[in-house]
Amino acid sequence: MLANPIYAGTLYWNRTQWVKVDDTGKRIRKYRTKDDIRGTAGNAPHLAIVKPATWKLVQLHLSVKKGTNPNVKLKSGGRTVYMLSGLLRCSECGAHFVMDNATHYACGSVNDGKACTNEIRVPRDVCERVILGDITNEVLAPEVIDKMAKESRQY
Ligand SMILES: [Zn+2]
């Protein structure tokens, strides 16, 4: 569900096509190439249940977690241990903020012994509450759960 763009109000269509396989008229469904489906996505704001900014943050987190984000290389071999691992950046040097100990994020270049003047340490629970609060409020709000339940029943 977190990867389905319909919840952000984006609807895709025409992503597959039926292709004749032989002279008998038998057809199989094939996915179109990315070039063929370009321009076939549209907005369906009435289907959106999360704000676009929240959607982008979730997709960013998922790409970091899966190790598919080309901008983030995690020391743990692509496995994230904390919700915001790989997503926070130091405003001074641009390095990733990483868990400095069990409870605080800090600039990663301080941990690596590189020079960084940023000595700010941020409690993990504060970061997660502030940054992830929207996701929790939007996705787990009673009216959103009701809407999803109704849509599920319709299907
Ligand atoms: Zn730094």
Image: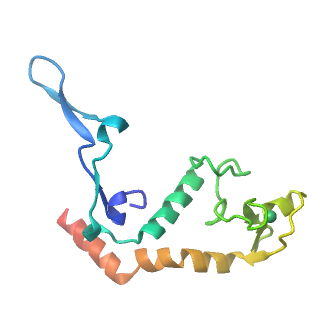
Q: In this image, 117 relative to 130: left or right?
A: right
The residue located at (9%, 19%) in the rendering is: 24
* Residue 77 in the image: above or below residue 18: below
- Seen from the viewer's position, the closer of residues 152 and 19 is 19
Q: In this image, 131 relative to 145: left or right?
A: right
* Residue 48 in the image: above or below residue 63: below
* Residue 115 in the image: above or below residue 146: above
- Seen from the viewer's position, the closer of residues 149 and 124 is 124
Farthest residue toward the left? 24
Farthest residue toward the top? 23
The residue located at (78%, 66%) in the rendering is: 92
Farthest residue toward the bottom? 142
- Image quadrant holding the N terminus, namely bottom left
Q: Say which quarter of the image contains residue 125.
A: bottom right
Where does the image place residue 40, in percent across and percent down from the top left? 27, 47
Where does the image place residue 134, in percent across and percent down from the top left? 49, 77
- Seen from the viewer's position, the closer of residues 140 and 106 is 106
Where does the image place residue 33, in percent across and percent down from the top left? 34, 34
